Image (tube, rainbow, N blue to C red):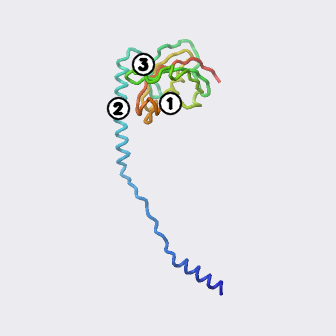
């Protein structure tokens, strides 16, 4: 009798349950936000590249275009054969950071001498690639568009969002590993 009652109660509970209807997510596939964002970024890049182009044209230096999306010129170039840093090599360098108006943001003293294992530590992409072009003892000035510097977020201190940078870098020592 107990089993029959338990069976009836279970049967009643199962039959009284109504299957729930799932709701479909509401989505907007128009892409208008993405399209507007793309267009805004294109305009920002165009303005930035025009400023850099004007700066490069006014320079009396021989400016080189890197394969990494930035420009550079030598302040001190070594003509002797020497190896450039590769993955895992340790380099010691110092640098300063300026905006396109040549206003100092960080001095070499502010940043102190840096030691960096090539491609194994955190460093903004332009400087990371720029160091690979240098020989020990060289001084190079790099002009980085914002996406090769600190990009959209800046450095959360003195470099704002979407700020192109000029960095004068001295490679003090290159230790091959």
Mark nearer the N terminus (3 vs 2): 2
Q: Height in image: 71 above or below 162?
A: above
Q: Secondary structure at mark 2?
A: helix
Q: Nearer the viewer, residue 22 or 154?
A: 154
Q: Quadrant of the N terminus?
A: bottom right
The residue carrying mark 2 is 46
Question: Mark 2, residues whose alpha carbon is within 10 Å: few (<14), some, or many (≥20)?
Answer: few
Q: Are marks 2 and 1 in contact (CB under 8 Å)?
A: no
Q: Secondary structure at mark 1?
A: helix
Measure how far apart labels 1 and 3 are at the Cα level.
Answer: 20 Å
Mark nearer the N terminus (2 vs 1): 2
Most extreme residue toward the bottom is 1
Question: Mark 1, residues whose alpha carbon is within 10 Å: few (<14), some, or many (≥20)?
Answer: some
Q: Are marks 1 and 3 in contact (CB under 8 Å)?
A: no
Q: Secondary structure at mark 3?
A: loop
The residue carrying mark 1 is 125
Image position, residue 39 (x, y; %): 34, 40
Question: Mark 3, residues whose alpha carbon is within 10 Å: few (<14), some, or many (≥20)?
Answer: some
Marker disc for residue 63: 3
Taking the spot 36% from the left edge, 47% from the top edge, the residue there is 33
Q: Quadrant of the C terminus?
A: top right
Mark nearer the N terminus (1 vs 3): 3
Measure how far apart labels 2 and 1 are at the Cα level.
Answer: 20 Å
Taking the spot 56% from the left edge, 23% from the top edge, the residue there is 114
Image position, residue 176 (x, y; %): 63, 22
Measure how far apart labels 3 and 2 are at the Cα level.
Answer: 20 Å
Image position, residue 168 (x, y; %): 47, 19
Identify the image quadrant of residue 64: top left
Image position, residue 110 (x, y; %): 50, 22
* Side of 82 relative to 107 (left or right): right
Q: Are marks 3 and 2 in contact (CB under 8 Å)?
A: no
């Amino acid at each position: 009798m107990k089993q029959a009652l338990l069976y009836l109660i279970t049967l009643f509970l199962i039959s009284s349950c109504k299957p729930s209807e799932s709701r479909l997510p509401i989505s907007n596939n128009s892409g208008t936000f993405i399209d507007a964002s793309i267009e805004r970024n294109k305009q920002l890049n165009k303005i930035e590249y025009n400023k850099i182009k004007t700066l490069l044209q006014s320079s009396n230096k021989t400016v080189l275009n890197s394969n990494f999306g930035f420009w550079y010129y030598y302040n001190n170039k070594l003509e002797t054969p020497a190896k450039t840093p590769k993955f895992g090599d340790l380099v010691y360098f110092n640098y300063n950071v300026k905006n396109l108006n040549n206003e100092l943001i960080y001095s070499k003293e502010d940043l102190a001498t840096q030691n960096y294992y090539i491609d194994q530590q955190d460093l903004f992409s332009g400087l990371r690639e720029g160091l690979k072009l240098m020989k020990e003892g060289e001084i190079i000035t790099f002009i980085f568009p914002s996406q090769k510097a600190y990009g959209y977020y800046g450095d959360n201190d003195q470099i704002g969002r979407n700020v192109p940078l000029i960095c004068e870098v001295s490679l003090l020592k290159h230790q091959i590993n």
